Amino acid sequence: MNDFISQRKDKLKQFKELISKSESSKPIDIPEGLFLKCEGCGDVIYEKELEQNLNTCPTCDYHFKINATQRIELITDESSFKPYFNDISSLNPLNMPSYNEKLEIAINNTNQLEAFVCGIGSIEGKKCAIGVLDSTFMMGSMGSVVGEKVTRLIELSIQQRLPLVIFSASGGARMQEGILSLMQMAKTSGALYYHNQKGLLFISVLTNPTTGGVAASFASLGDINIAEKSSLIGFAGPRVIKQTINEDLPAHFQTAEFQLEKGQVDMVVNRSNLKSVIGLILEIHRGNHYA
Amino acid sequence: MRDSWDIVKLARHPKRPTSIDLIGYLFSDFIELKGDRLFKDDSSIVGGIGTLNGIPVTVIAEEKGFDTNSKIQRNFGMPHPEGYRKAIRLMRQAEKFNRPIITIIDTPGAYPGIGAEERGQAQAIAYNLYEMMGLKTPIITVVLSEGGSGGALAIGVADKIIMFENSVFSILSPEGFASILYKDASLASKAANLMKLTAFDLKELNIIDEIVFEGNGLHEDKLVGYKNLKEVLIDLIKKESITPIEKLLENRYMKYRNIGVYLEGVKDESKI
């Protein structure tokens, strides 16, 4: 663990240096597709190299966002994941303008019906209920469908006495469903109350970004809260806070490291270590689930 | 059909009374209890005990303040994490002594600031939602004027939700909504009419249980609405207090469990 912490400190130092470096660097025109510019250090990365490196920057270790399919592939044991509740899709209950179009675009772009993908799979040989929020689907926002699927996954984990692992990535509650979205916060958190009563493990992994109504409900309620490196985590978005208080925000405000320092998460973990760390935690809780 | 923006304006009317005034009317023997035992007392949330028609109750209320000084002192009714933590502390105390809980919502939202984030605003709200679902005592929530977002919901997981006729309850302010939807906050009136934020809209959507009528409005004559609320509260507390605890908790869970509108069963195997 010490080794891990000092490693993290080194990375953080590296990251800090690179951030200050990137402020002065000018934007570079890059042809789309082949190369990407790192959001952390500004370095130009060959796309293939980025993929091979788990979508983390080879220079500064900045973690790029990944979608639900990539996350499941990264975390679950090969071909162990079986999706559940995949036939639930969104309606437009409040008749919000342009919501239908936005949904259609998101469905076509992601080849998913909604922003939450869930099911049963195994992580390092341990069977568990797994859910992933996908920030590429309407910012991973939580409306009726996401709230319902999260709740069903929690209930499934209770029925089958399985540990629960949820990866969050969300801008918060989905505005287009108004109060219905807000109430999903109470619904999902309430389901976790009963999950907790049954003595089952919930590992909440907060990835980039986890804010708003998702941060203020199930994502903060893990027995163990893990922040993935490079994640923005908080209740209010930095822009809103800046407008409210009318002053600049401290450096590293609402980063994963900030949340660790403030006591909101148990650890910050690199993407490359995530599977083994979760596997280890599941192993320690083996007796609580599989008997 | 009344214009929703007119109701928003009434909910924010400068002469509309705030929670402290309502508490004074409902509970002549109110004793305020302060502090979260962890960091400090947050005066944007008022908590305490008293009796309603002879029944001991715990009261938790968001308080906006009524003049410049008190508004500043109360942070315009925008709680920090310590406010929510005080609220849950007093609610657990209510559970211990089998006292029903009455919460009064009146907030634009939880405070978005550096200190609030440092002390875990998200965690504080989430924890209240989670704990309130299992509290073994009746919980009645009253929306007095403005119920904004997670900051309102954090004291609003209840067995019954009552809204005053001229109050609103929404995912964010109409201004915030308009600035996202139309990129223009000045179109708030247009946004308000789309958002379904009035007591009538929310009753129709089955989110709330009762509407308390105000006559000419609390800003004109508060006693009409206050009296109506008191009658509804006494009636609901009597009913909820004789419900067996297991049934009460099951009903509470199902109340929220059933919220949501979606399509199920059109299976598209190519999509997950």
Image (cartoon, helix red, strand yellow):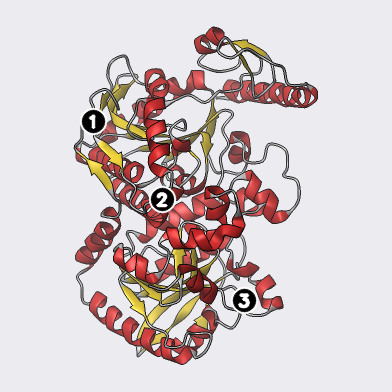
Q: Are marks 2 and 3 in contact (CB under 8 Å)?
A: no
The percent position of residue B139, horizontal first and vertical second, equals 34, 70
Q: Which residue is mark 3?
A: B65
Residue B89 vs A115, above or below: the answer is: below
Who comes first in sequence, dot 1 or dot 2?
Answer: 2
Q: Which residue is mark 2?
A: A96
User: Which residue lies at the image location 45% right of the left edge and 80% below the top edge?
Assistant: B49
Front residue of B268/B66: it is B268
Residue A70 visible in this rendered orientation of the protein = yes
Q: Nearer the viewer, mark 1 or mark 2?
A: 2
Query: Rounded to the nearest whole Å, what is the CA distance between mark 2 and mark 3?
Result: 34 Å
Quadrant (top left/top right/bottom left/bottom right) for the C terminus of chain A: top left
In this image, B136 relative to A63: left or right?
A: left
Front residue of A106/A146: it is A106
Q: Nearer the viewer, mark 1 or mark 3?
A: 3
Are marks 1 and 2 in one subunit? Answer: yes
Q: Chain of mark 2?
A: A
Q: Are marks 1 and 2 in contact (CB under 8 Å)?
A: no
User: Which residue lies at the image location 55% right of the left edge and 60% below the top edge?
Assistant: B188
Q: Secondary structure at mark 2?
A: loop
Are marks 2 and 3 in one subunit? Answer: no
User: Looking at the picture, which amino acid does disc 1 mark?
Assistant: Tyr
In this image, A188 relative to A159: left or right?
A: right
Residue A42 vs B75, above or below: the answer is: above
Q: Chain of mark 1?
A: A
